């Protein structure tokens, strides 16, 4: 199987797996301890969590703290719901945010939507009837790879005295994370394990708990942390920073090979302002479900993994002006560190062959 679905999840880095194993020991070892216990085994586990916290913190701008969570969805909920006490007004979110943001802001109180242009970039001036309390803009879109002008969102936040929340799930470990007040990331999108993420909180920003209980994470987030998951996250972050230039150069080679091999497809989203590990393409008259069935040795996507199987047209593709038919004629290919050029060539040939049989 050729795996080209890096936006959905990334393969676990061998270094991250190795770091996790020592904290999964059963009765014969000491790695299973609760990191919140005061005895020696607990203190060792707690020390491993703090090492991981420092490694993850290196992903972010300085002057803040890392709160471990179960993943970016929880981090986003904590940022939006936990900051509601700081100011009044709506939450302003871009039209192409992940459902974790859009569903949460619509559920948490008044909200406003910031439109995007045909390339998937936020328009300069959003329609606002009231000053926002928080602005939510993802750095790299998970469906079309657009890199947003976060500086414009930061200017608007400063103008209105609002907090800025950046969903950096697709950016972390791939590029410098934009400065913001609140930043959400997930380990499994940068070759770490599933089930752990983080919310970075700028110094001076306070949050109310969303999950209450023991207050293990600085009295903001409750629940027993997994030393194994934290350790895997930490090492994945460390490796991503160390390999940043190498990984980016490899992705550029893969992008060019994929664009050349799929040159008669139409690109969705910006080609200029985009992460090149994301290739979202469309072809008129294509039955994507049939294509995926016929190209079963290649793992790729028709859009966000969170919405797959729902039958809903992608809100991201509709927001950039595509018709329902065009959105349903679209596929997403994602590649990265462990993808080879040979895999791109084989996958592209198989996709082209099956698509041409349909649309000939």
Image: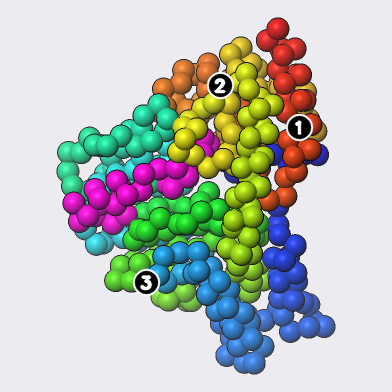
* Disc 3 target residue: 63
Q: Is residue 29 magenta?
A: no
Q: Secondary structure at mark 2?
A: strand
Lower position in the chain sequence, tag 2 or tag 1: 2
Circle 3 residues within 10 Å: few <14, some 14–19, many ≥20: few
The foreground one among 248 and 178 is: 248
- How far from the left and from the top, in percent, is residue 262? 66, 25
Q: Which residues are magenta?
A: 138-164
Give me the C-alpha separation between circle 1 and circle 3.
44 Å
Do callouts 3 and 2 mark residues in contact (Cβ within 8 Å)?
no
Q: Residue at x 44, y 48 (%)?
A: 139
- Whether residue 146 is visible here, answered yes or no, is no
**Residue that numbered label 1 is attached to:** 345
- In the picture shown, does residue 282 fall above or below 151? above
One can see residue 39 in this view: yes
Horizontal placement of 312 versus 62: left or right?
Answer: right
Dot placed on the residue nearer the N-terminal end, 3 or 2: 3
Disc 1 or 3, which lies upstream in sequence? 3
* Residue farthest toward the bottom in the current orientation of the protein: 40
Q: Position of residue 141 (x, y in %)?
A: 48, 41
Residue that label 2 marks: 266
Mark 1 in CB contact with mark 3 (< 8 angstroms): no
Q: Residues within 10 Å of mark 2 (few under 14, many from 20)?
A: few
Check residue 144 in the rendering and tell me which mark sits there, or answer none: none
Q: Nearer the viewer, residue 175 or 109?
A: 175
Residue 255's place in the image compared with 218, above or below, is above
Left or right placement of residue 160 versus residue 317 in this view: left
């Amino acid at each position: 199987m050729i795996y080209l679905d890096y936006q959905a999840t990334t393969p676990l880095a061998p270094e991250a797996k190795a770091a996790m194993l020592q904290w999964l020991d059963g009765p014969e070892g000491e790695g299973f301890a609760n990191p919140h216990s005061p005895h020696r085994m607990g203190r060792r586990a707690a020390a491993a969590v703090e090492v991981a916290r420092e490694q993850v913190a290196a992903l972010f701008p300085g002057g803040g703290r890392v709160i471990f969570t179960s993943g970016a969805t929880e981090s986003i909920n904590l940022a939006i719901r936990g900051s509601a006490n700081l100011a009044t007004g709506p939450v302003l979110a871009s039209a192409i945010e992940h459902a974790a943001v859009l569903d949460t802001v619509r559920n948490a109180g008044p909200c406003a939507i910031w439109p995007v242009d045909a390339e998937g970039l936020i328009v300069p001036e959003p329609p606002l009837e009231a000053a926002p309390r928080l602005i939510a803009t993802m750095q790299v879109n998970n469906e079309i790879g657009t890199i947003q002008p976060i500086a414009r969102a930061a200017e608007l936040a400063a103008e209105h005295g609002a907090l800025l929340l950046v969903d950096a799930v697709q950016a972390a470990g791939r590029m410098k994370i934009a400065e913001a007040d609140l930043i959400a990331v997930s380990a499994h999108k940068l070759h770490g394990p599933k089930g752990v993420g983080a919310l970075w909180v700028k110094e001076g920003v306070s949050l109310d708990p969303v999950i209450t209980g023991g207050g293990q994470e600085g009295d903001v987030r409750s629940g027993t942390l997994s030393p194994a998951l934290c350790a895997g996250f930490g090492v994945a972050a460390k490796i991503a920073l160390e390999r940043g230039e190498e990984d980016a150069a490899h992705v550029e080679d893969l992008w060019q090979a994929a664009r050349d091999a799929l040159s008669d497809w139409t690109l969705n989203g910006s080609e200029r302002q985009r992460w090149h590990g994301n290739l979202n393409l469309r072809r008129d008259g294509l039955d994507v479900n049939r294509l995926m069935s016929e190209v079963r040795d290649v793992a790729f996507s028709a859009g966000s993994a969170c919405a797959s199987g729902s039958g809903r047209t992608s809100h991201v593709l509709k927001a950039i002006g595509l018709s329902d038919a065009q959105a349903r004629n679209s596929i997403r290919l994602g590649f990265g560190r462990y993808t080879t050029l040979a895999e791109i060539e084989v996958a592209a040939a198989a996709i082209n062959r099956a698509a041409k049989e349909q649309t000939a």
